[in-house]
Image: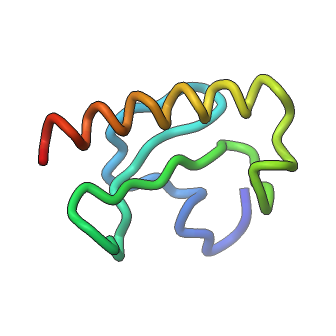
Amino acid sequence: MAKNCELCEPAEVLFEHELAYVRRDSRPLSRGHVLIVPRRHIASFFEMNAEEQIVVLEMLNRAQRNVTEEH
């Protein structure tokens, strides 16, 4: 966990997994804008291992359904 990292201290978590979580964006670009954040502190999707990528993609689909239902 990095010091002073906004993403390492989850806020407004919508749902989570041991490898990642989904939260509302603190500076949304549009209604329903969320962030899917891996628990491991890395710079990009491509640094994730296969299991992390699968979890993140599953969460992306779940988040999309959630945003569609809300908005």
Q: How is the image coloured?
A: rainbow
Q: Is residue 7 left or right of residue 67?
A: right
State the residue at coordinates (33%, 74%): 29
Residue at horizontal 47%, vertical 54%?
A: 35
Q: Residue 65, located in which quarter of the rendered image?
A: top left
Residue 27 image offset from top left, x and y in percent: 35, 76
Looking at the image, is 7 positioned above or below residue 58?
below
71 sits left or right of 30 in the view: left
Above or below, 71 against 30 in this view is: above
**For the point 53% across and 68% down, which residue is it?**
6
Measured as percent of width and height from the top left, residue 43 is found at 79, 62
Vertical placement of residue 17 versus 69, above or below: above
- In which quadrant will I find the N terminus? bottom right
Count all numbered tags in the image, as a single digit. Answer: 0
Residue 12 position (above or below residue 49)? below
Give x and y (percent) for residue 14: 32, 39
Give the percent coordinates (x, y) of residue 55.
Answer: 63, 26
Residue located 77% across and 23% down the image: 51
In screen coordinates, is 62 left or right of 48?
A: left
